[in-house]
Every structure is written in C-alpha cells, then in structure tokens.
Amino acid sequence: MAGSLFDQLKKSGLVDEKKAKKAKQEQHQQNKKKRANKTKKGQAVVSEAALLAAQAAEEKAKRDRKLNLERQQQQAKKAKLAELRQIIDTNKINDYDGDIVYHFADGKQVKRLNVNSKIHRGLVV
C-alpha cells in the first residue's frame, strides 16, 4: 500500500484529476464551515456562561438585600427593647417596702404588695 486512497483510485483509473481536485475543494469548504460553526457555538457557550454568571450575581444581590433587611429589622427590634429596659431602669423604685398593703390584679390573680405611704398615695391617685 504505497500512497493514499486517492493515489490508488487514480492508478486504477476510477478517478481523474479534475474530479479529484473538485472533491478536495469541496472537502476543504466543508471543513471550513465546520470550523466556523464551532466558533459560533463556542461564542454562544461563552455568552450563555456570561448570562448564567450575571443571573447568579443578580440572585446573590437579591438574597443579600433580603438578608440585610432582616438584619436591620432585628437591630431595630433590639434597639427598642434596649430603650424599654433603659426606661424601666431609670423609673424603677427601689425603696418601696413599707407597712401599707396594696392589692392589685395581675391577670386573673389578685396580688398584694407592701408599700410605704408615699408610694401608696401615688398608686391610689
């Protein structure tokens, strides 16, 4: 087997020079089209990858905004609770122990508290 298939067909007389050239040219054109299609598909893949990356970035940004909003709401809630505690601590009466009994309702129960006369006047009025 010396030579290519083309050479063997030429020697046997099945193919002449013109047909061989034309076949080679057509094959070259087909190869060229295939390469062009591959590059177009490659660009489509690249643009698809870029599109997916952009979409993922957008979803991440949306998720981050949502998390930030939740954190801000939690911080606002904490700040309100801290403010309430501060108000309670500043208005807290430490010296209320006394000899006068003051009855008050706590839900369904009636409770009693021993208070001094000054606090009793403030509670009754």
Image (cartoon, rainbow, N blue to C red):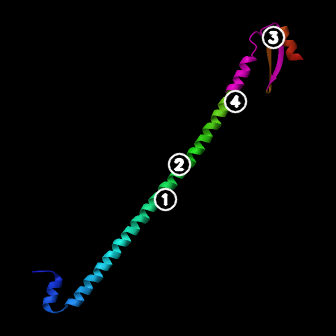
Q: Which residues lie in the magenta part?
A: 82-106
Q: Secondary structure at mark 4?
A: helix
* 3 and 1 marks in contact (CB < 8 Å): no
Q: What's the mark number on residue 60?
A: 2
Q: Secondary structure at mark 3?
A: strand
Write the residue at 74% across / 11% down. Answer: 94
Write the residue at 18% across / 92% down. Answer: 14
Pick the residue in front: 63 or 57: 57
Spatial CA distance of label 4 from label 1 is 44 Å
Task: Pick out the residue farthest to the left.
Answer: 2
Label whose residue precedes the other's in the sequence (4 or 1): 1
Q: Which residue is mark 3?
A: 115
Spatial CA distance of label 1 from label 2 is 14 Å
Q: Identify which amino acid the numbered label 2 is placed on.
A: Lys
Spatial CA distance of label 4 from label 2 is 30 Å
Q: Which residue is mark 1?
A: 51
Q: Which residue is mark 4?
A: 80
Label whose residue precedes the other's in the sequence (4 or 2): 2
Label whose residue precedes the other's in the sequence (3 or 1): 1
- Residue 10 lies, with reference to residue 69, above or below; the image says below
Tell me if mark 1 has few (under 14), some (14-19) or many (20+) residues whose alpha carbon lies within 10 angstroms of its own: few
Spatial CA distance of label 3 from label 2 is 60 Å
Left or right, residue 25 beside residue 105: left
Q: Secondary structure at mark 2?
A: helix
Question: Which is in the foreground here, disc 3 or disc 1?
Answer: 1
